[in-house]
């Protein structure tokens, strides 16, 4: 829920906005690093070149879920989004499947 915690625009909120932006970047890095560890451990077959895009996608999903929850989405609404995001997992992480990701064996974006 920290995604939009600081009001935008006001000069006095700059430090808070920068802190939150750093937290969002950290979330992306943690997801990307975990995906890379999955490749190293043999749990994930995605190509290394596709990890940044996959991490960015799932970071966006998590952050979007936070916004939706803040705005009153029901649990069923949020779970429907999660179901869709997880339906994308195999096409995004299986080499040779046409995911459209650069470095993933697809056509590129």
Image (cartoon, helix red, strand yellow):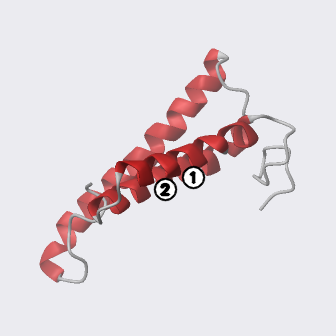
Outermost residue, left side: 12
**Residue ID at (24%, 83%):** 9
Q: Residue at x 49, y 39 (%)?
A: 31
Q: Residue at x 46, y 46 (%)?
A: 79
Residue at far top of view: 41
* Callout 2 crowding tier (Cα within 10 Å): few <14, some 14–19, many ≥20: some
Q: Please provide percent x and percent y for residue 84.
A: 59, 49
Q: CA distance from mark 1 to mark 2?
A: 5 Å
In the image, 102: left or right of 74? Answer: right
* Residue 56 or residue 66, whichever sits in front: 66
Residue tagged 1: 57
Residue under label 2, please give it: 60
Which image quarter: residue 10?
Answer: bottom left
- What percent of the width, then of the height, locates residue 27? 40, 45
| Res 22 → quadrant | bottom left
Q: Is residue 22 above or below residue 50?
A: below
**Taking 93 as reference, is 1 left or right?**
left
Question: Is disc 1 in contact with disc 2, using a CB cutoff of under 8 Å?
Answer: yes
| In front of the other: 2 or 86 | 86
Which residue is rendered at x = 31% and y = 51% of the image? Answer: 23
Describe the element under mark 2 as helix, strand or loop: helix
């Amino acid at each position: 829920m920290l995604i939009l915690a600081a009001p935008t625009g006001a000069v006095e909120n700059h430090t808070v906005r920068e802190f939150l932006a750093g937290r969002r970047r950290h979330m992306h890095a943690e997801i990307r690093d975990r995906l890379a560890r999955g490749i190293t451990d043999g749990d994930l077959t995605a190509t290394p070149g596709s990890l940044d895009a996959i991490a960015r996608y799932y970071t966006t999903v998590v952050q979007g879920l936070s916004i939706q929850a803040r705005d009153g989405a029901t649990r069923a609404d949020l779970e429907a989004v999660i179901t869709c995001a997880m339906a994308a997992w195999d096409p995004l992480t299986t080499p040779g499947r046409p995911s459209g990701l650069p470095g993933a064996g697809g056509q590129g974006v």
